[in-house]
Image (cartoon, rainbow, N blue to C red):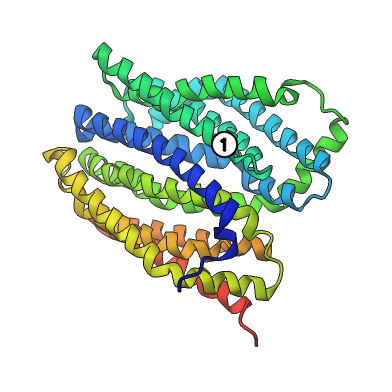
Amino acid sequence: MLKLPPVLRGYTAHQSLKILAASAFNNAVSLGVTVFAARQLGPAEFGKFALAVSAATLLALALDFGLSLTLVRIYNAEPNRTEGLRMVTAVLRVKLALLLFAAALSYPVSTLIVRWGPALLAGSTDLVALAIVSGALLNLWVGVRAGEQAGGDFGTFARFTVLYGLLRLISAAVLVIAGTVTGMGVFAILYPIPLVALLGWNLAASHRSVLTPTPTDGWSAELTRLRRAATYSMWVAVSTFTFTSLSRLPQFALARRSSAVDVGLYSAALSILAFFSLLNDAVRTTLLPRVAALRTRHERRDWNRRLLELTPIVLGGLGLGVISAAGALYFVMGPAYQSSAPLFLLLGGATAVTIQLGLFTMMVHAHGIPDLDARVNVGRLLVLGLLLVVLPPNATTAAISFATVLVLGETGLYLLLRRRDVPV
């Protein structure tokens, strides 16, 4: 009889389902709006929109510097809850400062990017500036949610995630009624408009200490906390940024070496793929604090053994989801995007395998060795960059290169971690 690991039963399972449902709603709204935009804009214009989304996502990761995940680990390892809460405040204060800094520099920086960047971005200064501000907003949003995750407040986490989806849906309806569907407008309703509204409410209601100019116990103690976090987060930052860049790098390579249509076709497949990746994040949100608490070799080996029993179910469910999504992409997004369906099957299959292996490779945080994950991901990114330079510049070779590097890298990380828990 199949028996779930203890960390997947009871309260944790209930919270995982709650986060999963909230994220599914938010992601479904985002996916629906993105599909609608793709049909309205066409591959070339949609390519610009997709590049803005990728830029905002990568900037959010760079600004985060691994602090959100590190916050979860330190909070749960800190016996003094007051100190844990002060760590949350310190991290959020840094993220708020980065938002103000990014907003001030958005237009000068976007002007330079449009001037020296790909020809595809010509005339898109406002969109690039909005992407910069949105990256900083996403960074703060993730930090606030990480504070809730660290404290086990998954109810608030889920509520604000649902509200994010609702605001996106309402804003999209207004955009459609107004009859002015542009890449800039769609991007605005998906990111800055709902994020500004929700973050303003969230900070005013629950994190007023973040808005005070001086820390409760002085700047010296605040800087000490941030230095403590940075020693762990720098490796998390490298790992997270390079891993996320794997799927985005082909977009920028195609924008530089290929056509706007190729960028649009690859981006359409990537947009559907994001739904699976974000659902995976929802499950990891509740599991990570528990995985980090696995201290002994016996606990870690028992976790892996139980998860191995779930592998056919997880891969089977993901496989059906990938095939269904590929069919939807082929029939729903219109004739212009039918060539994206085979690309999605490649990307989706690789992502399904990686999601399954990722349940095992979360163990880097049980071992406390984020540097191993970072080194593997840097290696993956370098190999992918080389393949994108050497191979012919088209959407198919880009998808094959990404899928291959993704699966082989995760498999290698899994084997390295497995060796650590196998008795010699």
**In terms of depth relative to the viewer, which is nearer, 229 or 13?**
13
Residue lying at 54% horizontally and 64% vertically, measured from the top left: 361
Q: Is residue 222 above or below residue 181?
A: below
Pick the quarter of the image with the C terminus.
bottom right
Kind of residue indicated by mark 1: Phe
Element carrying mark 1 = helix
Residue lying at 45% horizontally and 24% vertically, measured from the top left: 130
Residue hosting label 1 = 157
Quarter where residue 7 is shown = bottom right
Pick the quarter of the image with the N terminus.
bottom left
Q: Position of residue 43 (x, y in %)?
A: 21, 35
Quarter where residue 23 is shown = top left
Q: Position of residue 100 (x, y in %)?
A: 61, 22
Residue 36 relative to residue 408: left or right: left
**In terms of depth relative to the viewer, which is nearer, 234 or 160?**
160
Residue lying at 60% horizontally and 26% vertically, measured from the top left: 99
Quarter where residue 139 is shown = top right
Q: Position of residue 297 (x, y in %)?
A: 67, 75
Residue 77, visible in the rendered structure? yes
Q: Position of residue 31 (x, y in %)?
A: 32, 37
Residue lying at 26% horizontally and 14% vertically, measured from the top left: 177
Residue 195 relative to residue 186: left or right: right
**In terms of depth relative to the viewer, which is nearer, 20 or 195?**
20
